[in-house]
Amino acid sequence: MSVRELIHSLAISRMILRMAAPLVPRRERAEWLAEWNGELWHVWHSCNSGTQGSNLTAFCLGAFQDAYWLRRNNPNSSLRRLFRSGSPVKCGLSLLVFALASMWVCFLVPGSRSVMLPSPYRDPGDLVMISHGGHSSEHLPTVRLEDYESWETSTGHLFTQIAFYQPARKRVRVAPHRTTELSVARATDNLFEILNVPFRAAVPDQPLHASSASLILTQSAWRRYFHSDPNLEGNTIEIGGLQARVVGIISDNSWQLPGNIDAWILEDAKHLDEMPSSSRGFVLARVKPSGFPVGSSVRRSMTVPREKGDVDRYDCVSLAQRAHEPFALFLFTLLLACLALPATTPLPLGEYPLRPDRLPSAIRFRRWFFIVIKIALILPLVFFSSLDLAYAGLPLDSPAAQYIQMIASFLGFLFALRWALQDQRRRCPVCLRLLTNPARVGQASRNFLAWNGTELMCSSGHGLLHIPEIPTSWFSTQRWLYLDSSWSSLFSDSYLAPAGFS
């Protein structure tokens, strides 16, 4: 290697060292740069004498890695203090990341996203689903067609509009020589008028109650079975032997009622009369403002007299209430978990005696603020995670989804709150770091004569935690022992203020 090449390599190497120097903490930068320049001088002379063929540039590139590790392991770094192992900031940020990730997944999954979004219907509080048999039958078709037809004329004082639909599996011809089975609902022609759901009309000059049946498809069925054919609207499709004309396509989020339906056949009363009068389906109605007593907007009901003096009771469940069911389950399981929590873990956090010199009120407040933050982050984490599990592959009206959400949220709350309490007990009340270095103290054979248990210490020198092996009448719960500032020199993190003093 020539002298000119060595001098050129030396200049490039010094420039690399200057570029890596800003990564080093400011207090150590001058000394670090002097050490690397000294090492560079030895390597340059080795290359100049020919005894070593090291490349100066490759040697100096290692300065970046050295500077990075020096900054990362710097004990005086504020970031290192915040994000060191067991720190409260690291714990809180981890919970925040998990909560945001579960929320992000919740909005990615179509089912759980529909639960979170507001109702797509106009005035959902005035829209009710009429069912017979209580809350457990709201997801099943329980109203007979003959009852619906009688209500059209006899319930004018309760409802302004009323509609009927009956989902069923039918064979649909999706191509000249190919059929498939879809979930198709035969419905009255005013169904989407009551819901006030917009759809892309194919033949705007032809009303929905024309002589031929009208068909409305969901976007997912249009894309999956008809390959997003733009010329499909206005054509006639055979569905179970019935000819229906495609008049529109609606988005999947526009349907949040019972029945995982792919298409709707809208028919007038004359065509619906061809169905057996005992056919059961769902009834949707829009309530008059004065139709029900004041204060019954959440849970309404109506009675229908039968023969021999019998009376049938029908529940009128508001769509606004149905939209709030996931959140109501969330609150219910949270209450159950809080009631079951004392049976799984002790609620007291232990004995923390007052110091003679008294800790600042800000430090005492920070301890309780930290546990409140943990619980506040646990709530959305469990809520969104339970929605992800419940509605990942099940429709909105599925009872199985509600059971999955109930079980997942209850178990999630129970174990998460239990972890929050256990984590709080294992933290220093001054710096909130996790306690380390567990040590066994005492003998099990002398448990009733002397203290026997586990001792944990704060690595910053704030104190010791004594946890009894077997709770006794004189030592039933863990106890914290504060250490004064004279102990700080024995701990590695002596740069922290001992026992809360600045």
Image (cartoon, grey):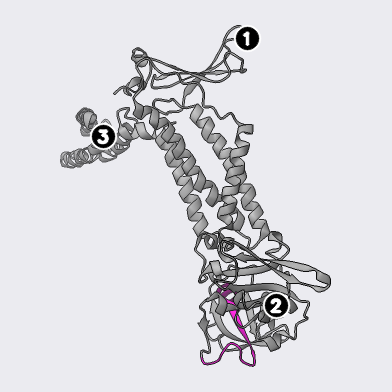
Alpha carbon distance from label 1 to label 3: 56 Å
Q: Nearer the viewer, residue 28 or 181?
A: 181
**Residue 93 magenta-drawn?**
no
Q: Nearer the viewer, residue 255 or 281?
A: 281
Q: Are marks 1 and 2 in contact (CB under 8 Å)?
A: no
Q: Which mark is residue 448?
A: 1
Identified at 66% across, 80% down, the residue is 152
Q: Which residues are magenta?
A: 205-224
Where residue 349 sits in the image (x, y, percent)? 51, 27
Q: Which residue is mark 3?
A: 24
Residue type (three-letter) at the residue carrying disc 2: Tyr
Alpha carbon distance from label 1 to label 2: 77 Å
Task: For label 1, count other residues whose C-alpha is less than 10 Å away and answer few (under 14), some (14-19) or many (20+).
Answer: some
Task: For label 2, count other residues whose C-alpha is less than 10 Å away and answer few (under 14), some (14-19) or many (20+).
Answer: many
Residue type (three-letter) at the residue carrying disc 1: Phe
Residue type (three-letter) at the residue carrying disc 3: Val
Q: Secondary structure at mark 2?
A: helix
Depth-wise, is mark 2 or mark 3 nearer the camera?
Answer: 2
**Quadrant of the drawing holding the N terminus:** top left
**Quadrant of the drawing holding the C terminus:** top left
Q: Quadrant of residue 277 in the image?
A: bottom right
Q: Which residue is mark 2?
A: 148
Alpha carbon distance from label 2 to label 3: 79 Å
Q: Residue furthest right?
A: 308
Task: For label 3, count other residues whose C-alpha is less than 10 Å away and answer few (under 14), some (14-19) or many (20+).
Answer: many
Where residue 137 sits in the image (x, y, percent)? 71, 63
